[in-house]
Image: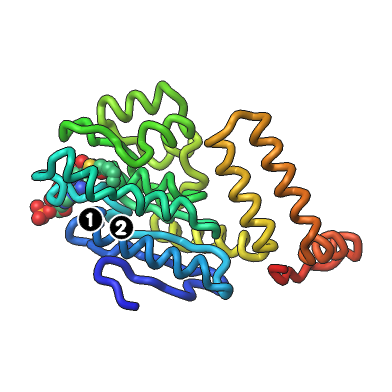
Amino acid sequence: MSYEFIVVHEELAPLVAGVQLNRPKELNALNLQLMGELRSALEKLDSNDDIRSIVIFGNERAFAAGADIKQMAGKGAIDMLKIDQFSTWDAIRRVKKPIIAAVSGFALGGGCELTMLCDMIVASETAQFGQPEISIGVMPGAGGTQRLTRAVGKARAMEMVLTGNFISAQEAKEAGLINKVVPVDLYLEEAIKLAQKVSEKSPIAVQLAKESVLKSFDTGLQEGLFFERKNFYTLFATEDQKEGMAAFIEKRKPEFKNK
Ligand code: HXC
């Protein structure tokens, strides 16, 4: 399938797929079509057994500068409600394979929120994260008040959301928003390395572990612990558990089969 605003790389590296956001002139502003394409591509990659993790990236100047302001400017509240763009975001949230955002340049508004929808974030030293919606008379709508606050805490989230100030990659790293900061020529490579490391593990264990970490955002501690425990027990029904533990005891590398 061909897309207009994204480029899909089924084999960015062995077992790793990539999706590049591709509206460079508009700094990858996330219009509805782009988000629909992204959802469709991610769902396809999620059901492809030859792929174990996915990297989303933009270009050196921008990961994404937010939702497309020109597309939103003339809309009313009921238009926005009917468009229901967040069902697309919810579908991306349900992707089972790990997704890594490789960020250079601007990750603003919906762009910052998209990085937070991913499971890990690798950034170049030039990356800037921000929720500038307040400067255009609105507020974040795709997780910028919720995921950001959980990631960086109230003080910094309030400052970013209420002033629209950007933070640097280094500040984002120190605040716990992102995983790694690397020189600009390495950000994609480092994200791929991280994806490859995850891709070596048992895919079923990775899936249930991802699901369990995400569950912590939605539940209290006790319920989350029960959820974690059930996933932990479930993994003892897999061949990969037998293989992983046998390999440890036999001092060899495990060969996981996703079974
Ligand atoms: C539409 C955008 C855009 C956006 C940039 N462009 N951001 N178009 N929506 N979010 C377009 C510009 O209009 C311009 O097009 C071209 O991209 C290059 O941008 P410039 O402004 O000329 O570049 P620069 O001077 O380097 O400034 C970069 C920038 C600035 C600081 C990132 O573009 C900016 O402030 N952008 C908006 C950031 C923002 O407010 N994001 C939040 C959006 S609301 P032309 O045709 O003029 O060359 C949001 C809500 C999410 O994300 C809700 C859930 C989905």
Residue shown at the point (58%, 73%) measured from the top left: 49
Q: Residue furthest bottom?
A: 1
Q: Is residue 26 left or right of residue 116?
A: left
Above/below status of 156 relative to 133: above
Three-letter amino acid code at disc 1?
Asn
Residue shown at the point (26%, 66%) measured from the top left: 5
Where residue 64 sits in the image (x, y, percent)? 29, 52
Where residue 46 sits in the image (x, y, percent)? 51, 65
Pointer 2 with pointer 1, Cβ within 8 A = yes
Three-letter amino acid code at disc 2?
Met
| Residue 50 seen in the current view | yes
Where residue 50 sits in the image (x, y, percent)? 57, 75
Give the crowd class for mark 1: few <14, some 14-19, many >=20 residues within 10 Å: some
Q: Quadrant of residue 137?
A: top left
Q: Badge 1 is on which residue? A: 31
Q: Residue furthest top?
A: 155
Q: Quadrant of residue 259?
A: bottom right
- Secondary structure category for the residue under label 2: helix
Q: Badge 2 is on which residue? A: 35
Residue shown at the point (50%, 36%) measured from the top left: 176
Ligand 1 contact, mark 1 (Cβ < 8 Å): yes
- Secondary structure category for the residue under label 1: loop
Give the crowd class for mark 2: few <14, some 14-19, many >=20 residues within 10 Å: many
Residue shown at the point (30%, 38%) measured from the top left: 141
Q: Is residue 110 left or right of residue 138?
A: right
Above/below status of 2 relative to 114: below
Q: Give the distance between the C-alpha atoms of the residues marked 2 and 1, in whole angstroms.
A: 6 Å
| Residue 65 seen in the current view | no
